[in-house]
Image (spheres, rainbow, N blue to C red):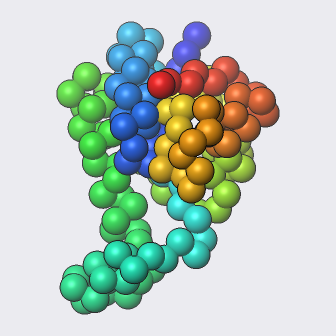
Amino acid sequence: MIRTILVAVDGSEPSLRAASLAADLAVKYEATLHLVQVVQPLSVTKELEEFARVERMDVATSRDVATRYLLGPAESIAKTAGVRTVVREVLTGDPAECLLDYTRDRAIDLAVLGRRGLGRVRGLLMGSVSSKMSSLAECPVLTVK
């Protein structure tokens, strides 16, 4: 029985396709859908610094706002599909390690990830996060193209 489904969301097209498939499954099984965004601890870009300046907030706050903004489209997909219970989480750290811990700590029944996200190395056939999750997760992992 599938009661809890995790979707790793990073704003990429593969992660949104993963969110769509996971939402369909969540509706079918009446499962709770966990939308999880993982950010690197010191991922500050020029764009983020500019966003913070324009919005008159510190960089840490602006990163939180920008990150939560990335969860919006995935949440809309879930709500449109009819998912009843959606949990939004923003974690900080190594994406694969955070997702592995999350699936274990919350007894997630299924993890759904895009094959490649917005990571630094786009050319790999399968992203390092989805590859690591497939190898090490204690729950089944569904990888979406």
82 horizontally vs 101: left or right: left
Measured along the vertical axis of the image, is residue 20 above or below residue 65? Answer: above
What residue is at 48 percent from the left and 50 percent from the top?
Answer: 118
What residue is at 69 percent from the left and 34 percent from the top?
Answer: 131
How many numbered marks are there? 0
Task: From the viewer's side, name the closer residue of 91 and 128.
Answer: 128
9 horizontally vs 41: left or right: left
Residue 101 drawn at (x, y percent) = 71, 46
Q: Is residue 85 visible?
A: no
> Considering the image in quadrants, where does the N terminus appear?
top right
Task: From the viewer's side, name the closer residue of 4 and 65.
Answer: 65
Task: From the viewer's side, name the closer residue of 43 and 116.
Answer: 116
15 horizontally vs 127: left or right: left
Residue 48 drawn at (x, y percent) = 37, 76
Residue 129 drawn at (x, y percent) = 64, 42
Based on the displayed image, in which of its 4 quarters is residue 126 positioned? top right
What residue is at 53 percent from the left and 61 percent from the top?
Answer: 39
Measured along the vertical axis of the image, is residue 16 above or below residue 22? Answer: below
In the image, farthest residue toward the right: 136
Residue 35 drawn at (x, y percent) = 44, 41
Q: Is residue 114 visible?
A: yes
In the image, farthest residue toward the front: 123
What residue is at 73 percent from the left and 38 percent from the top?
Answer: 132
